[in-house]
Amino acid sequence: MDFIFNRPVSAYAKLVYAYLYACADDLGKVYVSKNIIAARCSMSVSSVRNTFRTLEAEGLLVQKLQISEHGDYDSNCIQLLGGELT
């Protein structure tokens, strides 16, 4: 995961990626809300959203909206990309 610290991204982006990495399963998937990320990383939800945009633009993650079998919005799946995830 050290590669993230060599990327030209903000300290917020590095912090959020490191937190997501810690939460990820063996396939690099994370199921955690932006509210939880904000609380754990001591930042605002809007800063988390902006950071996600940066990480997506850098090709470091993809967000997938999950929809329940009843058609309701469910949790987001965040897929980490880049570097070794295991």
Image (cartoon, rainbow, N blue to C red):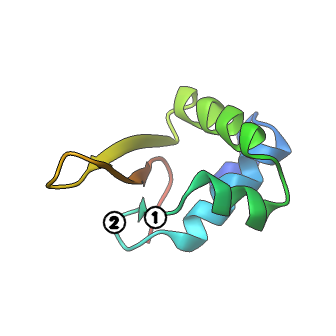
For the residues labelled 1 and 2, the Cα–Cα distance comes to 7 Å
| Neighbourhood count class around disc 2 (C-alpha, 10 Å): few under 14, some 14–19, many 20 upward | few
Q: Which mark is residue 27?
A: 2
Q: Which residue is mark 1?
A: 85
Name the foreground residue: 35 vs 51: 35
Where 77 sits versus 26, above or below? above
**Left or right for 64, reference 15:** left
Where 31 sits versus 58, above or below? below
Say what amino acid the circle numbered 2 marks. Answer: Leu
Q: Position of residue 45 (x, y in %)?
A: 73, 45
| Neighbourhood count class around disc 1 (C-alpha, 10 Å): few under 14, some 14–19, many 20 upward | some
Q: Which mark is residue 37?
A: none
Name the foreground residue: 23 vs 34: 34
**Residue depicted at 60% across the width and 30% down the height:** 53
* Whether label 1 touches label 2, CB < 8 Å: yes
Q: Position of residue 13 (x, y in %)?
A: 73, 44
